[in-house]
Image: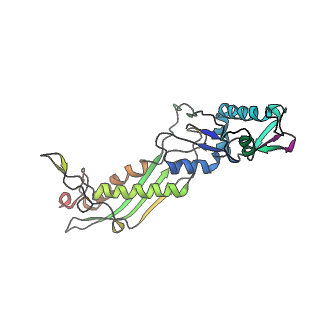
Amino acid sequence: MNPVYDFAGQVSFVTGASSGMGLATARAFAASGAAVALADIDDKAVHAAAERLADDGHQVLALVCDVTVEDRESPLYGVREDDVIVRGGRLHVKNDPARGESYQRLLARNNRSHLEVRGSYGGPSRPERHSISAYNATFAEVAVDATLGLVRVRRMLGVYDAGRIISPKLAESQAIGGIVGGIGQALLEHTVTDHRDGRITNANLADYLVPVNADVPDVKAIYLNGEDPDGNALGVKGLGEVVLVGVAPAIANAVFNATGRRIRELPINAEALL
């Protein structure tokens, strides 16, 4: 995480970047409470992370206070920096909330668009006696046509331990998308290469099969309640590839239970079962 505290206008933002974090995840992370920098932070986990970034926050606060208390037109001119409170988009005297001003007025008067400081928080060192990875169990129910050798998925269920789920809607979309992709990997998707020139011969959606609605009848994802304080201050884990990797093995196991035939190559097609 490489946060930037931006005091443009009345709202302060924290933007983050880390390996594998997408824009939607970053927005959800911000919406969880981490977007309120040096203001009222009620969430204990976010507050703990903010405390770890205290050095960066103090740099921002010092920068803001320097501009404010040295500005002769500011209501806070001459006030000691330790007596300035930063809260709710304003700066004011500790025991006199009426004596203060907004970031917007302060910056506009000093011809500044923003004040910012960059820092980083890499989290604690990986604990030797704790696992901080995400886990899942994937369940599949399939039907196999004994005459044609066709496999159809009837139901899929994924159960995930991903720590604290910051954005349930985003997590649901990720899990369902991973399961659908896994169905395609297990039963449909296959790249055919022309070994004479290395070209892909089925590089189109007519010949390269992907799952459609009829291939995905009943899919459900469940998330275990819990946080992982040993991994990071927010108690979150990753929910990336873990939603995909168990799908094809689960389907292959279900096919084995139905037919007694163990298939070790993907996709599982009729030729492999007949």
Q: In x, y percent, where is residue 44?
A: 68, 44
What residue is drawn where x is 14% and y is 45%? 197
Q: Quadrant of the C terminus?
A: bottom left
- Can residue 226 be seen by looking at this rendering? no
In which quadrant of the rendered view does residue 235 lie? top right
Q: How many marks?
A: 0
* Vertical position of residue 248 compared to residue 206: above or below: above
Q: Residue 41: name its quadrant.
A: top right
Q: Quadrant of the N terminus?
A: top right
Whether residue 94 is visible here, answered yes or no, is yes
Identify which residue, 7 or 185, lies in the foreground.
7
Whole-percent x and y of residue 189?
A: 27, 56
- State left or right for residue 242 relative to residue 224: left
**Is 107 covered by the magenta stretch?**
no
Question: From the viewer's perspective, is residue 63 above or below residue 12?
Answer: above
Q: Which residues are magenta?
A: 90-99
Q: Nearer the viewer, residue 60 or 143?
A: 60
Q: Nearer the viewer, residue 167 or 255?
A: 167
Residue pictured at 69% horizontal, 39% vertical: 111
Residue 98 forms part of the magenta stretch: yes
Q: Nearer the viewer, residue 44 or 8?
A: 8
Residue 102 screen position, x and y as percent:
76, 45
Query: Measuring 19% from the left and 57% from the top, which residue is drawn there?
Result: 272
Residue 163, image x, y percentages: 54, 47
Q: Place residue 53 in its image quadrant.
A: top right
Q: Is residue 10 above or below residue 131?
A: below
